[in-house]
Amino acid sequence: AVPTISRALNDAPDIGDDTKRRVREIATRIGYRPNRAGVRLRTGKTNVISLVLSTEHDMMNHTARLIASLAGELRGTPYHLIITPFFPSEDPLDAIRYIVETGSADGIVMNQTEPFDRRVAYLLERDFPFATHGRTTWEHPYSDYDNRAFGEIAVEMLLRKGRRRIALLRPPPTQSYSIHMTEGVRIACEKAGATLKVIDDITSDNPGQMIEKSIPRFLVGPDAYEGFVIGSANAVMAVVSA
């Protein structure tokens, strides 16, 4: 019966294991896939997770790794991953509002978080499932790299090489991980009595050509800087080229 097939595919506890196995084997053999529009009408779920990303080109190396990781975790589940882009000239909240108001996904993953991120506040207020790559001041699901520890370790490595004049090319200062990274670098430099220059007119997210043109002023003269702590791999290549 249709209800039995449906319940077997959805792992209902009152359906026997043998029946579930036979139903799944046949579904696989004939290439059956549930109609997502029908599933949404019946259950209210889309079985979609949306990864919301900026279209900034210098972020693409990180973006590829993030997509691959999420896709790997969703493999073998009923969920599918879609990308919802937004352009740097747009309000990042618009993409979030669209997903929530249209019900086009069951959950959201996003990055480039700020301490008081308006997107997070919006999702918390509406009790919409989400997780962030990066932290905010609020409690919510997140995954993050310890950027403060990175800043401290980077400075310690430079100090061991005899570098006492250190420059920090940080990510955009409004983002949480930039704040944590700067804090770690500053603490380590203060402890060692090293000179620190936080570069404030460019960031590690700027295009490589812009960074390459800007960095030489920190490399010449009696006050030249001897070591750099840098917030992205793309920016590292631009600084090395400079």
Image (cartoon, rainbow, N blue to C red):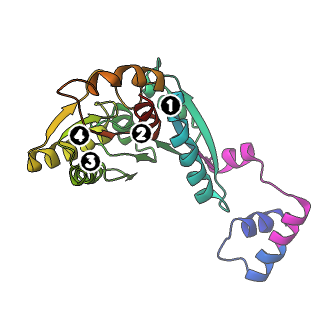
Label located before the other in sequence (3 or 4): 3
- Residue at image mark 3: 151
Q: Can the viewer see residue 100?
A: no
- Residue that numbered label 2 is attached to: 232
Cα separation, mark 4 vs mark 1, equals 21 Å
Which of pointers 1 and 2 lies earlier in the amino acid sequence? 1
Q: Secondary structure at mark 1?
A: helix
224 relative to 205 in the view: left or right: left
**Residue, disc 1:** 58
The earlier-in-sequence mark between 3 and 2 is 3
- For badge 3, the amino acid type reads Gly
The quarter of the picture where the C terminus appears is top left
Position of residue 61 in the picture relative to residue 139 (left or right): right
Q: Are marks 3 and 4 in contact (CB under 8 Å)?
A: yes
Q: Which residue is mark 4?
A: 182
Magenta-tinted stretch? 23-49
**Given the image, on which type of amino acid does mark 2 rest?**
Ser
Secondary structure at numbered mark 4: helix
Q: Position of residue 19 (x, y in %)?
A: 80, 78
Could you tell me the amino acid type at mark 4? Thr
Foreground of the two, 163 or 198? 163
52, 139: nearer the viewer: 52
- First-in-chain label (4 vs 1): 1
